[in-house]
Image (tube, rainbow, N blue to C red):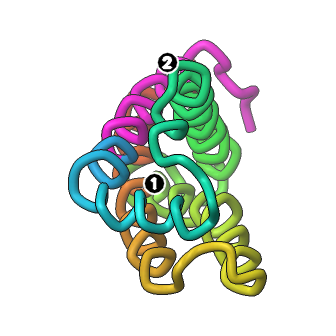
């Protein structure tokens, strides 16, 4: 079992981060913009604040950090499951479970967000994370 190739984790992570950030933009600012804004208002928040400079910077950074973590997960499980898209998809599901699914259960339990929007976001993010991790995994090489 070799060591993790960190330069390739970061390269693949940047690719995965681009996919994640694009997916998040499409979800929050294009396809479900109205529903997201309604949910923000229901929580007493200004929807425009979500897109303000500092907030947007944090969300973009979050997307890249998630992408790096996803490719790192791929690199960690690759010796056991083998290289390739299937392992990338498995890593994407694992990251989705830890990053999106579990936190969504907490949000549903606390009544923070509309349940239908959370379920839609969970389905969207599952596809997004699998595609992003698989794309990032393509750039990961052990040597």
Q: Magenta stretch: dominant SS?
A: helix
Q: Residue at x 52, y 80 (%)?
A: 114
Nearer to the camera, 29 or 10: 29
Q: Is residue 46 left or right of residue 104?
A: left
Which quarter of the figure has residue 70? top right
Farthest residue to the top: give it: 7
**Residue range of the region highlighted in magenta in the rendering:** 1-23
Indicate which label's residue lies in the foreground, 1 or 2. Answer: 1
Instruction: Count how many numbered circles sit on residues in the image.
Output: 2
Nearer to the camera, 100 or 36: 36
What SS does tag 1 mark? helix
Instruction: Please give the residue where the numbered disc 2 appears in the rendered image.
Output: 11
120 to 67, vertically: above or below? below
34 to 8, vertically: above or below? below
Q: Earlier in the sequence, mark 1 or mark 2?
A: 2
Q: Residue at x 47, y 47 (%)?
A: 47
Q: Residue at x 32, y 37 (%)?
A: 22
Q: Position of residue 108 (x, y in %)?
A: 67, 83
70 to 9, vertically: above or below? below
Q: Indicate the quadrant containing the N terminus: top left, top right, bottom left or bottom right.
A: top right
Instruction: Please give the residue where the numbered disc 1 appears in the rendered image.
Output: 129
Label 1 – label 2 distance at C-alpha = 16 Å
Is 75 in the magenta?
Answer: no
Which quarter of the figure has residue 111? bottom right
Is 10 in the magenta?
Answer: yes
Q: Position of residue 67 (x, y in %)?
A: 54, 36
Nearer to the camera, 70 or 102: 102
Q: Residue at x 42, y 66 (%)?
A: 38
């Amino acid at each position: 079992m070799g060591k993790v190739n960190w330069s390739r984790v970061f390269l693949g992570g940047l690719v995965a981060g681009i996919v994640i950030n694009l997916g998040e933009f499409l979800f929050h600012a294009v396809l479900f913009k109205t529903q997201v804004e309604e949910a923000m208002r229901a929580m007493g928040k200004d929807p425009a604040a979500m897109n303000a400079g500092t907030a947007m910077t944090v969300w973009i950074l979050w997307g890249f950090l998630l992408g790096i973590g996803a490719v790192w997960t791929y690199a960690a499980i690759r010796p056991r499951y083998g290289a390739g898209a299937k392992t990338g998809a498995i890593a994407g599901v694992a990251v989705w479970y830890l990053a999106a699914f579990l936190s969504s259960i907490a949000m549903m339990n606390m009544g923070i967000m509309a349940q239908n929007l959370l379920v839609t976001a969970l389905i969207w993010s599952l596809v997004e994370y699998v595609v992003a991790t698989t794309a990032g995994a393509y750039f990961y090489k052990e040597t």
